[in-house]
């Protein structure tokens, strides 16, 4: 997994590409989120447009990242889910946990 980070106002946009799976992207995702939370970024937006697959370990890390953000009084939102990732979140009912957006403008506007 690879990542690119940029700021749009006070929102940290983290664009991910590749796999979020055991042994490849799961640990990287955890480190990325924790680093940004430690740097006191309170509004995190994960752009998943480039994520082509996610396994149960990746799903677990997404949930752990969401929980870490909540525990630090931060917000974590998702955007640009591929149909495959969207299906995974639908099947696991996690689509009801995450705030999910189709485009960056809507996602950034949704941060309070």
Image: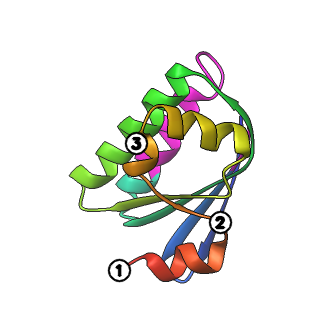
Q: Are marks 1 and 2 in contact (CB under 8 Å)?
A: no
* Residue at position x 51%, y 21% in the image: 57
SS at mark 2 in the image: loop
Q: CA distance from mark 1 to mark 2?
A: 18 Å
Residue for badge 3:
65
Residue that lies at the very extreme toward the top in this rendered image: 23
Left or right: 72 in relation to 109: left
Q: Which residue is mark 2?
A: 102
Residue at screen point 33% across, 52% down: 69
Q: Mark 2–mark 3 contact, CB under 8 Å?
A: no
**First-in-chain label (2 vs 3):** 3
Query: Please, is residue 53 above or below residue 33 in the view?
Result: above
Of residues 87 and 20, the one drawn nearer to the viewer in this rendering: 87
Residue drawn at point x = 27 percent, y = 54 percent: 70
Query: 78 above or below 28?
Result: below
Q: Which residues are magenta?
A: 16-35
In the rendered image, the vertical position of residue 27 relative to residue 30, given as above or below: above
**Which residue is denoted by mark 1 in the rendering?**
112
Q: Residue furthest front?
A: 91
**Coordinates of residue 2 in the picture (x, y in percent):** 73, 40
Q: Which quadrant: the C terminus?
A: bottom left
Q: Position of residue 58 (x, y in %)?
A: 54, 28
Left or right, residue 34 beside residue 79: left
The answer to which quarter of the image holds residue 28 is top right
């Amino acid at each position: 997994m690879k990542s690119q980070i940029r700021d749009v106002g006070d929102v940290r946009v983290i664009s991910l590409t590749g796999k979020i799976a055991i042994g490849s992207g799961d640990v990287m995702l955890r480190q990325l989120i924790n680093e940004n939370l430690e740097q006191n970024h309170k509004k995190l937006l994960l752009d998943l447009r480039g994520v082509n697959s996610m396994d149960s370990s990746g799903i677990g890390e997404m949930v752990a990242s969401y929980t870490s953000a909540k525990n630090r009084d931060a917000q974590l939102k998702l955007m640009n889910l591929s149909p495959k990732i969207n299906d995974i979140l639908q099947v696991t009912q996690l689509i009801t946990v995450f705030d999910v957006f189709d485009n960056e403008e809507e996602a950034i506007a949704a941060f309070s």
